[in-house]
Structures are given as C-alpha cells and as structure tokens.
Image (cartoon, helix red, strand yellow):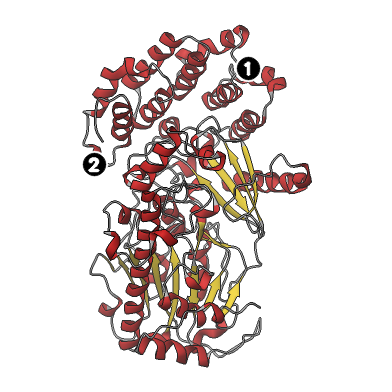
C-alpha cells in the first residue's frame, strides 16, 4: 500500500496541525471485514470545491501549495481514481443528489431543468427521515425542477450548529473560490502566490502570457481554497465535533482552464477525493489512515455510500454502489462518464474509464471539441489560445481541439495523463478497444440513455411525463434508435445503403441518426442528396437542421439557409440552438442576420438563455454585436 506522507509539505498551521496529527497517531491499520460494537450514527461533513482537478500536493503536484488538504490526506484516505460522471456542475450535481446517472434521468444537458419521477428522491431526504439534521451551504444546482424536502436549511447561512442537541448532522459546505469565474477578473501578477514563469503548461496549451497568468492565478485560488478548508476544519474541532464526524473532501468536477471543465477527458472528470474517519468510525473505512485507495469511484456512488455509512438501506433504484460502510460492494471495473449539451453548444459523448484506459465515443464528431462558448471565452487564456490557433502559431496537438474529432478515442490514461496519443486505430490495442466498446454499449443500454433523442425533440416526446419514464415506456423504440446511432457513428462509405435506409423510418430519431451518419461521412453524390432532400420538410426540426448541413456542404447553400430560417421561426429553445450551431459552420450564414438578431433581442443574454447566447456568438462572429 502506498504512503502519501512523504509528499506532504511541512507548514505550521497551529491547532489544526495538532488536531490532525493526533488523528493520524490514533489511526490503526484496518482489517477488511472486521467487526466492532454498535456505534452511534456518525456526523457526515462534505467539503466540496468547485471546478478543480487534483492540483494538490498530496496528489504529487509540486507546484501546488495545499498544506491543509495534504494533512487531511495524511490522516485520511486519498482516492486516486475518483471521477465526476459529468465534467460540469449541474449534471454532475444531479448525479450526486439522486444516486442516478444524469444521462438516465434526462438531467444531462446543462441547466435543462427537466423533471424526474416522484419516487426518485434526493438522498438527504432519507437521512432526514432517519433523524439527521441536513444542511447545505449553499450551492444546489441539481438540474431539475423537482421540489426538494431534504434540507432543514439550504442557504449561505446554513450550518450544522443549528441542529437540536444530540442530533447527528449531514452538512455540505461548498467552496466557490476555485470556480471558473475566478479567472474572469485578473489578479495583478505582483499579488499572485505562484509565478507564471514557473507554470508547467499542459502540452495542448500554447505558451502565451495569458495562458501562463491564468494557470498561475488558478493555483493561487487553489491555495485560497486550501486556507478556507483549513479554517473550516479548525472550527469543527473548536466546536468539539471532530471526533464524531466523517469528513469528505472532493471537487464537483475537473477544471478549469480550456479543455478541462465540460470535456470528457481526464482533465475534466478526474477529481480529488479525500475521506477522513475519526477513531470511533474507522471500522467503516476501507483502508488505514494515510493510505491511497485505488478503487474506481464516481459521483453516482456518493449517495449510496453516505446512506451506507449512516446505516440506511440503499434504495433499489439508485444506479451507484456504496464503496464504504456495511453495504460496501465489490470494486467496479469501470466508471461511466457522459457529456451532453454544454451551455449553447450541442454535443453527445460517452466514455468508460477502467483502472488504466479511457474510451470515448463522440456521437457528433463533425464538431470540434472546442466550440466557442460565451462563458468559457471570458477567460483571457481561451481568447489567447483561439488567437494563436488562428494565427497558425499552434502545433498539431494544440490545434486539434479546434478541428473535427474522431468518432472514437482510446487513451492509456496512466501512461499518457494528458491524453494526447489516441490508440483507437492502433492494432496493438484492438482487444482493449473491443472490450471497452462493449462495456460502454452495455452501460448505455442498462441505464436507458437519454442522449439518443436530440434535446429539442426529446422535450416534445416526453411532454406530460418525465424523460426517465418516457424512455422506459412502450412508446419509446429504444433498441431501434440506439442501433441507428451505433451505425451512424461506426459506418464507413460501404454502409451508405444502410444509412439511407434509415431516412425513411417512421421514427424521427432513427431518421436523425441516418442523416447524422451521412453528414459525418461527408458524402455529396447526387444520388445521396436525392435521398436526403425530402428530410428538408421533416416533422422533426433537428432532422431538418442536419439536412440543411448536408445540403450546404453539397453546394445547395440557399436552400440550406432557407431550411435554417424556417427552424429559427418554428423551433423551441433547443431546436433553435441546434440550428444556430449549424449556422456557425456555414460561411454564408450572415445572410440570416435578421433572423438571428431577432432571437438575440428576445431575452437578456445574462439570463443564461442559451438561444440568446448562441445568437450572440454568431452576431459577434459577423461583427454585428459584442458579447
């Protein structure tokens, strides 16, 4: 078993050092399956940071200055393979609060606010029913409209201190100092605790002054985060609660510079996670203090794990598995990961990660990974990266994220942590590719993945019910649609007859995937265009948008723009976003400036209305509007 103590930097922190040192001295080696007398219910404390990967000294990052979290790791258990199932906050937090995959619930698209079934509870409700005092300070962001009755208090002032005497608590303390927005206001270089010149840039980032400054500023904020967590732990000790409290620390997903948050790579999904057990609850732990736990854990496992620690039976509908406590399960082989619409950009990617490899399937590979997002581009580093790319100053690795992606990606994440060397077409890894393809297919089938129906269409289909229930009802031809999607992603030019056969299917999502496959392959022959043309008047507006892209690439530009014009006039918010995403890749798209301006003027762009943001990006691109 690895020991992390040698990684810890020596820094005096007063009473906190004394307290954590005492806990480390008390901790003993645990024997799996050991028994102990019945314990009173533990307090459970979550310390949750925003938008950061494992940029901590205890994870081997020698540029980080994080003495408090390092010491927490020395007296706790460090999880080396912890993953956010989604690389952005709302779907990640939806997964956490329910113990179900957001891709299964229909809560994957960013801030989609889709309802979920009444029987699927937010897990603190079970804790509250069992007598816990449950508080949250303060971020929720659960990506659904479900009414929540689990918190006794959820606000900036929420505290475990308000509980009745003798009542166990579950408290979530959110720390926003490391959030992406920390890069939107420049910290003067003379105030930074980290030197931009000493930053070790990822190979995919160009070496620009703004990139270096943003990285240094980010580490500066991580140090601030560490200080805030140290203060909170010191207060817990002062309150006399440390010896009765199991402490979790984790980040809500990876981040935060370009190609991390929102992206389904290691940089966007791998998170730090440390769990500390006081002496009286060490029998619930999986390792002894100061250990590294290599088990794969992901956010879908957090709800069942907390219920297991609290002695509450895990509901059967939860899709995660407890990794601690009496209901601890066998180690899983894979983490299941997903990416859907990110703000105003449509996308669909799924992945599985085992102990070594990461397999990614991109269902919209004709789109670049780094499509311009209004919020992401507020960071100076992103603007500088885009500028360097357009000026031809980026190398192949730095350029590839602005260009169309492969349909499949396979990385040795242990040997290639920045995931630069795609092994999907390397015959030496054919067995790994086949195994992980099958694992992903099985997981999507088992969980009832909502991504096979485009977002605008799905909201229409599930009207009057929940997406979760619709996907499990008799009216949803899931097998047929998922097979069409698989053909769309995997088809070669020899499969064109199979793709065109999908275009006449009675189900609009099957037709959608047929058109998507033809768009991906870039086939422009007259015969294929004749087959595609009738879809210009399809009942599904997202099918019309795909048809417009195919026709545009085939030279029928005016007709394609007419199709997009019609979608902008008729579509719901997400159908409109999809159409404007397509328009961004049409060099004569400015001909629709009046229609796009109309969308922009509908709402306040600061209100997170994604059709407004998408239209603003187009107008800025055309020199007609500043975002």
Q: Quadrant of the C terminus?
A: top left
The location of residue 387, given as percent across then percent down, is 39, 37
Tell me where residue 383 sits by quadrant: top left
Give 190 or 557, whichever is nearer the viewer.
Answer: 190
Name which residue lies at 66% across and 81% down.
32
Q: Which residue lies under the disc numbered 1?
A: 500
Residue 562 circle label: none
Q: Which residue lies under the disc numbered 2?
A: 606
Give left or right: position of 74 versus 431. Answer: left
Give left or right: position of 34 versus 429. Answer: left
Give left or right: position of 170 versus 506. Answer: left
The location of residue 6, given as percent across then percent down, is 56, 81
Q: Quadrant of the N terminus?
A: bottom right
Is there any visible trace of residue 438 in the rendered image?
Answer: yes
The location of residue 57, given as percent across then percent down, is 48, 72
Name which residue lies at 26% across and 53% down.
185
Of pointers 1 and 2, the one earlier in the residue sequence: 1
Give 318 or 8, whichever is nearer the viewer.
Answer: 8
């Amino acid at each position: 078993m690895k020991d992390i103590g040698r990684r810890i930097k020596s820094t005096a922190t007063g009473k906190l050092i004394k307290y954590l040192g005492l806990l480390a001295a008390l901790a003993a080696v645990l024997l799996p399956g050991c028994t102990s007398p019945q314990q009173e219910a533990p307090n459970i404390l979550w310390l949750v940071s925003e938008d950061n990967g494992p940029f901590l000294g205890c994870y081997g990052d020698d540029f980080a200055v994080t003495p408090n979290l390092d010491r927490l790791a020395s007296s706790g258990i460090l999880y080396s393979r912890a993953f956010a199932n989604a690389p952005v906050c709302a779907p990640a937090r939806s997964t956490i609060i329910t113990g179900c995959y957001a891709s299964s619930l229909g809560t994957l698209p960013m801030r989609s606010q889709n309802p979920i079934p009444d029987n699927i509870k937010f897990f603190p409700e079970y804790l509250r029913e069992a007598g816990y005092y449950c508080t949250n300070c303060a971020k929720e962001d659960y990506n659904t409209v479900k009414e929540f009755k689990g918190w006794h208090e959820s606000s900036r002032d929420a505290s475990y201190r308000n509980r009745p005497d003798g009542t166990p608590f579950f408290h979530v303390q959110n720390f926003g100092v490391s959030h992406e927005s920390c890069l939107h206001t420049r910290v003067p270089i003379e105030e930074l605790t980290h030197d931009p010149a000493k930053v070790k840039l990822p190979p995919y980032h160009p070496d620009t002054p703004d990139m270096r400054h943003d990285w240094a500023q980010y580490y500066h904020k991580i140090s601030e985060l560490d200080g805030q967590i140290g203060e909170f732990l010191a207060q817990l000790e002062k309150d006399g609660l440390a010896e009765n409290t199991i402490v979790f620390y984790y980040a809500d997903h990876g981040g935060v510079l370009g190609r991390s948050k929102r992206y389904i790579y290691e940089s966007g999904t791998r998170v730090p996670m440390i769990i500390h057990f006081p002496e009286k609850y060490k029998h619930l732990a999986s390792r002894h203090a100061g250990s590294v736990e290599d088990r794969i854990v992901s956010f879908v496992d957090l709800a069942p794990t907390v219920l297991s620690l609290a002695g509450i039976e895990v509901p059967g509908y939860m899709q995660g598995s407890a990794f601690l406590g009496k209901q601890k399960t066998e180690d899983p082989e894979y983490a299941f990961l997903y990416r859907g619409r990110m703000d105003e950009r449509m996308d669909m990617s799924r992945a599985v990660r085992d102990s070594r490899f990461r397999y990614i399937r991109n269902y919209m590979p004709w789109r670049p990974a780094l499509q311009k997002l209004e919020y992401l581009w507020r960071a100076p580093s992103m603007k500088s990266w885009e500028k360097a790319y357009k000026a031809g100053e980026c190398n192949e690795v730095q350029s590839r994220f602005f260009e169309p992606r492969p349909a499949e990606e396979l990385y040795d994440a242990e040997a290639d942590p920045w995931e630069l060397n795609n092994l999907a077409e390397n015959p030496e890894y054919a067995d790994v590719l086949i195994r992980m393809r099958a694992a992903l297919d099985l997981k999507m089938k088992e969980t009832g993945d909502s991504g096979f129906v485009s977002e605008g269409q799905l909201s229409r289909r599930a009207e009057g019910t929940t997406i979760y229930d619709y996907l499990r009802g008799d009216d949803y031809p899931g097998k047929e649609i998922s097979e069409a999607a698989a053909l769309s992603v995997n088809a070669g030019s020899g499969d064109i007859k199979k793709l065109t056969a999908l275009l006449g299917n009675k189900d609009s999502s099957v037709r959608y995937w047929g058109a998507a496959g033809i768009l991906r392959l870039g086939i422009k022959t007259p015969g294929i265009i004749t087959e595609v043309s009738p879809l210009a008047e399809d009942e599904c507006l997202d099918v019309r948008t795909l048809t417009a892209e195919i026709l545009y690439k085939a030279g029928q530009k005016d007709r394609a723009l007419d199709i997009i014009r019609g979608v902008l006039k008729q579509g719901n918010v997400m159908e409109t976003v999809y159409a404007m995403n397509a328009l961004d890749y049409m060099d004569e798209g400015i001909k629709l400036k009046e229609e796009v301006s109309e969308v922009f003027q509908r709402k306040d762009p600061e209100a997170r209305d994604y059709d407004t943001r998408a239209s603003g990006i187009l107008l800025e691109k055309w020199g007609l509007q500043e975002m």
